[in-house]
Amino acid sequence: QVQLVESGGGLVQPGGSLRLSCAASTSIFDIVRWGWYRQAPGKQRELVATITNVDSTNYAESMKGRFTISRDNAKPTVYLQMNSLKPEDTAVYYCNIVTYLKGDYWGQGTQVTVSS
């Protein structure tokens, strides 16, 4: 069983920044793709960004230019740098990994609140 541990959420003012982290309890060589998703109250979970094991990235349109996904090749950790945050970015952010042989996994989620 693979576990994902997220951190870095919190309360930030509009225009501010946050950096989310997600550490996986498996080898980086097991992971095909990392992803960040979010779910706002009353809405469906949506894609934020993904990064593959060859560092190919994909972003939701509304996050392009504001959010950056990256990974640490020295350890199984993915990051989401979020800049120019808006109130509509308020949501629970979830980390996801797709592995070669062990299936897909989700983190427990971390709350991000953008409010003045």
Image (spheres, rainbow, N blue to C red):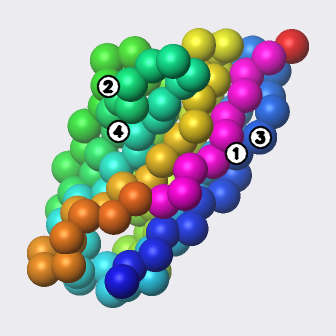
Q: Which residue appears at 77% of the width and 40% of the height?
A: 10
Say which mark, if any, is on residue 68: none
Alpha-carbon span between mark 3 and mark 4? 19 Å
Q: Is residue 23 magenta?
A: no
Q: Are marks 3 and 1 in contact (CB under 8 Å)?
A: yes
Question: Disc 3 vs disc 4: which is toward the camera?
Answer: 3
- What range of the chain is rendered magenta? 107-115
Q: Nearer the viewer, residue 64 or 104?
A: 104
Question: Disc 4 vs disc 1: which is toward the camera?
Answer: 1
Residue under pointer 1: 9
Q: Is residue 29 above or below residue 115?
A: below
Asked if residue 111 lies left or right of residue 37, the reply is: right
Q: Quadrant of residue 57?
A: top left
Q: Tag 1's secondary structure?
A: loop
Kindly identify the amino acid type of the residue bearing the numbered disc 4: Ala
For label 4, count other residues whose C-alpha is less than 10 Å away and answer few (under 14), some (14-19) or many (20+).
Answer: many
Q: Is residue 113 magenta?
A: yes
Q: Which residue appears at 44% of the width and 53% of the height?
A: 95
Kindly identify the amino acid type of the residue bearing the numbered disc 1: Gly
Alpha-carbon span between mark 2 and mark 3? 22 Å
In the rendered image, the quadrant that contains the N terminus is bottom left
Q: Are marks 2 and 4 in contact (CB under 8 Å)?
A: yes
Q: Looking at the picture, how far across and down is residue 97, in whole percent?
A: 31, 62
Q: Tag 2's secondary structure?
A: loop
Alpha-carbon span between mark 4 and mark 1? 16 Å
Identify the mark nearer the N-term, 3 or 4.
3
Q: Quadrant of residue 32?
A: bottom left
Asked if residue 53 can be seen in this view, the reply is: no
Residue under pointer 4: 49
Alpha-carbon span between mark 2 and mark 4? 6 Å
